Image (spheres, grey):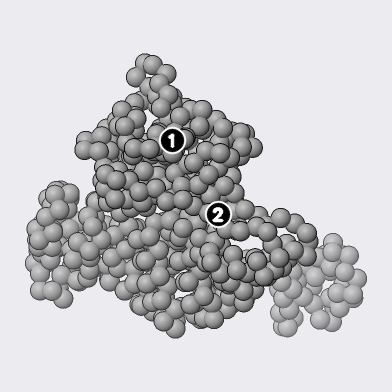
Amino acid sequence: MKIFRKVLLQVCALSACMTTAAFAQAELRDAVDAGDVIAAQNMVKKGEAEEIYCGKLPANDAVKIYEKIFKAMPDESFANCPSQFAYGYGTKVCLNAKAMNACTEVISYLLLESESGNTKAIDALEGVVNAALKTKAYAKPVKVPVDTSLWVVCPKKKGKAREACVEECLEQSLNMKDTVRADLCETNPEHYIDTTIKVSVPSPLYEKLRKGLLEGYWKTQKSSAVRYATIIQKSARTLSIPDSEVVNLNYVSRWADKHKADSTALPGGELFRFCTSWQQAVDSMLALKGFETRCPVFESFVDSRDGQTYKVKDINGTRWFVQNLNYAIEEKSMCYDREEESCKMYGRLYTQEAALVACPDGSHLATDDDWKLLEIYAGGANVAAEKLRSNGSDDYAFTAMFGGYANKNSISVIQGEGAYFWTSKDVGDGRGVARSMFSTDKEVSSIPVDKNFWLSVRCVVNGD
């Protein structure tokens, strides 16, 4: 805290604030938690902050309160307010040639956030990448210490030090069975020592971007992959990304040619990822190359209650909604963390009571039997998630979204990692049956869940 106070007082001095003020961290926290930006600003200006605290402040409000501190202490600021700093100050910090470490941390944070398909994170990432690539200092190789062992010339001057070094030369050479070096120990002695040297390595920030963007295209939700492709294409030259690794239609063409030459089927998950980015162009390309395979075909289902349109896919005779339901039911549905942005991407979360009546006319909440048929078709429950998740192979365009869940106290958890879907089945004791899957696992699990928990909903179009 001493370093923080010293820098804070320096910042305050620039703003002519009261450097003799008593620290009042509890009051600052109360103001931040209450969303009282003006009160928090005044406390910081007067030097009454003991640490950087952002709570659940929106990013723009956090910047209003702490901007001078964010600028003076970027590493500490990110450590204390990673979300607010990344979203509200990431672009500015990545224009600061002296803040490469903080910029790299921001990039790592936004890459991770973007992999869940968070469009807000991808927007921020694009701005941060543009800023970082404009900052020439970030492109320079850096010197890093490396522990190694080297043969070093013995002292020239005669004496005990040289004699000891010659003995080491002989002993080390014989232990290594290096007879040539042993023969030189009397005339040109060297001894083998552990040491640390500095070597040049490519910019760690550029390496983080190269790896993160290329991996991110394949890890993110399929609907967001095209955003990654666009960022990769714009930054490829600056980051020295080979043309063969830039994901675009030329990449898709080479991919198709390779499978044609090997007489192998086009992997469904990869095809669907390309199709969500460039469907018409991909279909035309496949036709010219003589493939019978085409991009998935979706129906549209319009919810007459609010006008929202959902994609529907026939999967082995069952017409599934391949998007999570996003119909608002007062007090019985919610957005993850009460943020509307989450509903736009992941749909709403429902109690089971609400889930049973949430699907629009002409459809129904997926039953336990609907799910069992889907799991069997996807190879069995032990491996089905790999075929159904939106960041996996997703051969059936089911596009399972990892919207997390909220417990009965409305506390939201594991968005971007876990997907939980209500079924219509009741097991008694206040619990219903749900399906769950995770972004890194193959299994689809059937689990009993308290009916007052809030989970995602997938609807199925009623049969004729």
Q: Callout 1: helix, strand or loop?
A: loop
Query: In the rendered view, does 151 fall on the left or right side of 294?
Result: right
Q: Quadrant of residue 75?
A: bottom left
2 vs 1, front mark: 1
Give x and y (percent) for residue 454: 33, 35
Task: Please tell me how crowded label 2 is: few (under 14), some (14-19), or many (20+) other residues with Cα within 10 Å.
Answer: some
Q: Quadrant of residue 326?
A: top left
Judging by the rendered image, the residue that carries numbered circle 1 is: 462
Q: State the quadrant of the N terminus.
A: bottom left
**CA distance separating discs 2 and 1:** 21 Å
Is residue 197 visible to us here?
no
Dot 2 or dot 1: first in sequence order is: 2
Q: Which mark is residue 296?
A: 2
Image point (34%, 68%), residue name: 90
Q: Callout 2: helix, strand or loop?
A: loop
Query: In the rendered view, does 287 fall on the left or right side of 179?
Result: left
Give x and y (percent) for residue 117: 43, 56
Tag 2: amino acid: Pro
